[in-house]
Image (cartoon, rainbow, N blue to C red):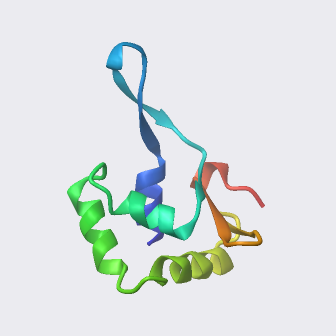
Amino acid sequence: MTQLLTSCLETETVTGTGGLQEKRFTNYWEGSALELEQYLCSDVQEKHIVDSCKRLMTHNTAIANYLGRIARGHPERVKGIKTRKHTVWRIYQPSTAKT
């Protein structure tokens, strides 16, 4: 799961002026577990990433469970920030991980 997350977080495609697309490095991803699942399983990803995502997401809380386990094992890579409504997850790149 950690490799799947890292492969998706290294770059993002941004549409610049004139409709040109470029990939930009990102230091971290932040959002809800549902947003991450939708991103990982979306059509924007390469086929092997989508396939891996669909194999891992066997039930509706799977990604939140995975994120919680990763956060406990690698607190420098994944942080869960609890709000009144849900948990906001922040996933850092290995080279920019915060403690």
Residue at the bottom extreme, as displayed:
59
Q: How far across and how far down the image is residue 2, in percent?
A: 48, 68
In the rendered structure, the answer to whether residue 41 lies left or right of residue 2 reads left
Q: Is residue 60 above or below residue 24?
A: below
Most distant residue in the front direction = 85
Instruction: Please say if 86 is above or below 93.
Output: below
Query: Where does the image place residue 87, in percent across and percent down from the top left?
Result: 67, 71
Above or below: residue 86 compared with residue 31: below
Q: Position of residue 66 (x, y in %)?
A: 52, 80
Residue shown at 49% from the left, 61% from the top: 35
**Residue closer to the observer: 46 or 81:** 81
Q: What residue lies at 39% left-to-right and 86% top-to-bottom?
A: 59
Q: Quadrant of the N terminus?
A: bottom left
Give the residue drawn at x 67%, y 55%: 97
Quadrant for the C terminus in the image: bottom right
Please indicate, yes or no, whether residue 53 appears anywhere in the rendered image.
yes
